[in-house]
Amino acid sequence: MVPAGHHLLLFALASLGGAAAAGAGKGFCSAEPSNDCSQSPPLYSKVTSPTLAPVHFQDLPGFTRSVYKKDHALITPESHVFSPLPDWTNTLGAYLISPALGAHFTMYLANMQDGSKSALPPKDVERLIFVVQGSIALSVESGTTHSMLVDSYAYLPANMKHSVISDKPSTLVIFERRYTAIGDYHADLVVGSTDKQPLLETPGEVFELRKLLPTSLPYDFNIHIMDFQPGEYLNVKEVHYNQHGLLLLEGQGIYRLGNSWYPVQAGDTIWMAPFVPQWYAALGKTKSRYLLYKDVNRNPLI
């Protein structure tokens, strides 16, 4: 007999497998690519059009894969709630992580359209923007404008004046937190793209790791890009003081949080509180990639 608490896990696993099979021509290609796979979908397309999309649950009123517990949360696309972002122009946002959960940062999606324009974050709040769909123009107070495509990002130090404009439908994932200053250190503007960042050593692990921000003391958080081939997994079940905010950009797998096991797919968001046990394994036939917020370089007593 299957314990009652495992029914949702089994249903979601079956749904992931069924949806992947049904959509094999829409991004889940075989291990040996056929002619059908020659036209690859846009990078990170599953974030905005997930395999298990909200439309698949319209005949299941009240159903969601989202879960909230005191030390972690899984926020899945069918439960996103979009509304106009305060002071932004023609932009809808969905807050995925906020201090209401227990986090010390916010993480949200911003859906921009032709003519959309950003607003500034609150005073003393730093911001990181990562483009998952479309393209934007980022202008900063120095007068420089940066053209940002999918997989590019920008870190804006606290109180740096800037604006983001879009002339086409674009989706951004944005992290914001109140900057924790130490000494005379000051963080600088960073604009880059994932593919320009070097692979870093991961002793004892098999996944590939890139860090988007400098590891020096001025920066009080970093964003990791972690890649797993099918069947790869974290060798260490981590428990640490850092918080995490995660967006699965590609692929699917299983995430352990505390004593719970969750099937996850591209488009899913996870919040991890300090000291929650965590572990990931990649499933399916395509690479998994996730984007991970992590606070760094500060004494936990500050």
Image (cartoon, rainbow, N blue to C red):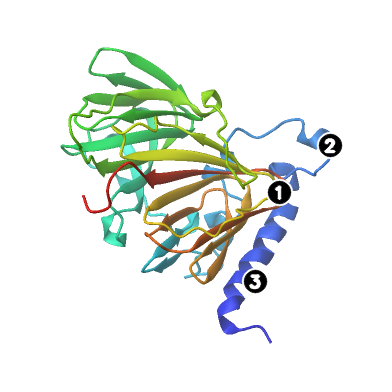
Q: CA distance from mark 3 to mark 2?
A: 30 Å
Location of residue 35 with respect to 267 vertically, above or below = above
Q: Amino acid at mark 2?
A: Ser
Horizontal and vertical percent position of residue 38: 77, 30
> Image quarter for residue 103?
bottom left
Pick out the residue farthest to the bottom. 1
Q: Which residue is mark 1?
A: 230
Q: Which mark is residue 10?
A: 3
Tell me where residue 153 sits by quadrant.
Answer: top left
Tell me which numbered mark, 1 or 2, is placed earlier along the sequence.
2
What is the spatial separation of the Cα atoms under label 1 and label 2, in whole angstroms?
18 Å
SS for dot 3 = helix
- Which circle's residue, 1 or 3, is located before the other in the chain? 3
Rendered image quadrant of residue 239: bottom left
Look at mark 2 in the image and give the residue it sits on: 34
Q: Residue at x 26, y 30 (%)?
A: 157
- Three-letter code, disc 3: Leu
Q: Going from the N terminus, do you reach mark 3 or mark 2 first?
A: 3
Three-letter code for the amino acid on which mark 1 is drawn:
Pro
